[in-house]
Image (tube, rainbow, N blue to C red):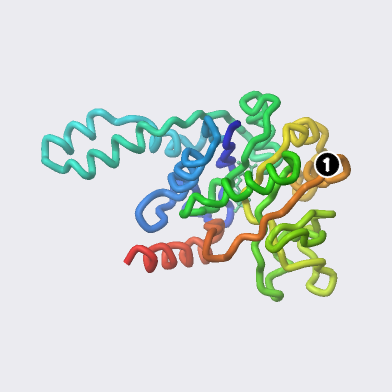
Amino acid sequence: MKAVIPAAGLGTRFLPATKAVPKEMLLVYDRPAIQYVVEEGLASDADEVVIVNSHGKKAIEDHFASDADLEALLRERGKHAYADSVESVGAMPVKFVYQDEALGLGHAVLCAAEETADEPFYVLLGDVLVPGNDMLPAMQKVSDEHGGASVIAVMPVPDEEVSRFGVIAGVEVEPGVWKVDSLVEKPPLEEAPTNLAVFGRYLLTPRTMELLRDVKPGVGGEIQLTDALDALLREEEMYALVVSPEDGFDTGTPESWLATNIALAKRAS
Ligand code: UTP
């Protein structure tokens, strides 16, 4: 089973910073955002972490490459803790595949199809952090309890923010676990079936990859993962695990990135 991390997006909402620095490389408290995500993938039962990158975002690859010269220099200067941190990040087993045009999240996931083969796979958005590394195991447990079904993480959002998110409709089958009937993109509050927003962690069956191949470009000309999940829902059961706002952080906008930095810094102090 693979953990797929899409990280090839344009980071438009961070421009002009993301002209030169990939959004996923922005520092969150003490390490680049994507390092948390890779650590989470490695801590899970996935046997490999696959980053979907674009050739224009080389800094991500540089971060996970070994740097023997820097390490040696730091050791020579007695800075062993820093040398260890350089060594450990360079030794993280990460594979790269490429999406050279940002054609949407669905398309990015599809770029990893050869890697996931016919197995279920995780998708971890490269700008969404789960520092406790405990969400994927909880999702796997729900999947195991429901015949290997797909499971998506959802987070309650305040009513006034519902219209900014994709939310689920469905029924709660046990505390904190919903059987999903449909996904509703950015509903006005009065039409929102729930306030449970799709959060950026997915455990998906191999059928999702097949369905993604047939998804036509939707909003903004992008191939949306949500469209493949809609198609999947017509064929298979899908569950949603409700996660708490303290467990996960979206760093996709300057405001949410800053709030995440503050939250993690407070947690560390
Ligand atoms: P986002 O929509 O948050 O990232 O996608 P983005 O597209 O880079 O941001 P904006 O909207 O332009 O500001 C969530 C994750 O999916 C990746 C992104 O890199 C991010 O980590 N992604 C998105 C891709 O890999 N390819 C895409 O075509 C789109």
Residue 124: percent from left, percent from top: 58, 45
Picture layout, residue 20 above or below residue 155: above
Task: Please give the name of the residue rendered at 57% of the width and 57% of the height, measured from the top-left corner.
Answer: 13
Residue shown at the point (55%, 60%) measured from the top left: 253
The answer to whether residue 114 is seen in the rendering is yes
- SS at badge 1: loop
Viewer can see residue 20: no
**Relative height, residue 79 to residue 196 (above, below):** above
The relative height of residue 109 versus residue 181 in the rendered view (above or below) is above
Which quadrant, please, contains the C terminus? bottom left
> Label 1: which residue?
236
The residue under the point 39% across, 65% down is 267
Residue drawn at the location 76% of the way across and 36% of the way down: 208
Choose top left, top right, bottom left or bottom right for residue 205.
top right
When asked about the image quadrant of residue 209, the answer is: top right
Q: Is residue 62 left or right of residue 162?
A: left
Mark 1 is surrounded, within 10 Å at the Cα level, by few (under 14), some (14 to 19) or many (20 or more) other residues, namely few
Describe residue 108's horizontal placement relative to residue 171 as left or right: left
Give the percent coordinates (x, y) of residue 196. 71, 63
Residue type (three-letter) at the residue carrying disc 1: Glu
**Image quadrant for the N terminus?**
top right
Counting from the top left corner in percent of width and height, residue 240 is at 71, 54
| Front residue of 197 and 222 | 197
Q: Is residue 71 left or right of residue 168?
A: left
User: Who is closer to the viewer here, 80 or 61?
Assistant: 80
